[in-house]
Amino acid sequence: AAAATRALGAGDARAKTADVKTAYDAYAPTYDALDGGGAARALGLDALRADALARCEGDVLELAVGTGLNLRAYDANRVKTYTAIDLSPGMLARAKARAETLALGEKARFEEADATALPFDDGSFDVVVDTFSLCVIEDPSAALREVRRVLRSKGRAVLIEHSKSDVGALGAYQDLTSAPVKRMSKGCVWNQDVESLVRQSGMRVVKTQRALLGLLVVVEAAP
C-alpha cells in the first residue's frame, strides 16, 4: 500500500510538472509584454533587476529563466559561466535566442530542469538568481534547499520576489485576496514571506531591499 501511495504521489507530481510545461509554453509568445513591458518599467522592475544582477560574478545559475528578461542586466565581464534552467522548452528557446545577441551568450547554457530537483553537484555555483519564480513554485522551500545545496560556501542567492507587504493594511489585503490572485496570475502567491522561507531553508538573510510599499523584495542570502 505504501509503495502504491508513493507511486501515485510521483504520478501526481509528473502530471503537475507536465501541466506547468504546457502552460508556460503557451505563455511564452506573450510573456515579455506582460512581465517586461511598459507597466513593469513604470513599476521599477527593470531598475530592480539591473541593480541586483549587475554585481553577480563567477559561476551563475538562474532559476526559471523564462524568456531571459534578466540577461541584459548581467555584466558579462564579471560572469565566468551562466547556466539557466526552466521547465518550459518554449521559454528556454526564447531565452537562448535572446542570449545569442549578447556577450553573455558565449558563456551561457540552458537546461530544461526543475528548481526543486536541480541536476547539479553540491557547491557548483557562486551565485543563484531567482526572479519571481518562488511565488509560483508549488514547494518554494524545496527550491531554496536546492539553492543552498548548489551554492559554494561563500556564494550567495539573489531573490527578487513578490512578498507580503510590511504595511499593515496592505499586507492584510494581500492575505484576503491571496486565493483569487493565485487563480488569476499563473499560480502566484503574492503574500509569501520570503525572508522566513530563506531562513527555513537553512540559509542566512544578508540584506533585504523593499520596493512598492513592500510588495516586492530583493533578498540576498548566504548558505
Image: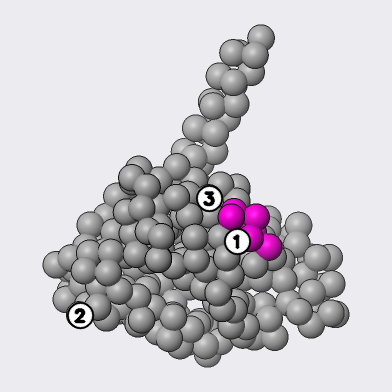
Q: Amino acid at mark 3?
A: Arg
| Residue denoted by label 1 | 198
Answer left or right for 152 relative to 110: right
Quadrant hosting residue 103: bottom left
The kind of secondary structure element at disc 3 is: helix
Q: Is residue 99 magenta?
A: no
Q: Is residue 199 magenta?
A: yes
Which residue occupies the foreground of this view, 101 or 200? 200
| Residue denoted by label 3 | 145
Answer left or right for 165 relative to 53: right
Residue occupying image coordinates x 70% and y 86%: 213
Q: Whole-Å distance between the Cαs marked 2 and 3? A: 29 Å
Asked if residue 191 shows in the view, the reply is yes
Q: Whole-Å distance between the Cαs marked 2 and 1? A: 29 Å
Q: Which residues are magenta?
A: 196-202
Q: Amino acid at mark 1?
A: Val
Residue occupying image coordinates x 27% and y 69%: 58
Q: Residue furthest front?
A: 153
Q: In the figure, 20 relative to 5: above or below?
A: below
> Which mark identifies residue 77?
2
Quadrant hosting residue 205: bottom right
Q: Main secondary structure of the magenta part?
A: helix
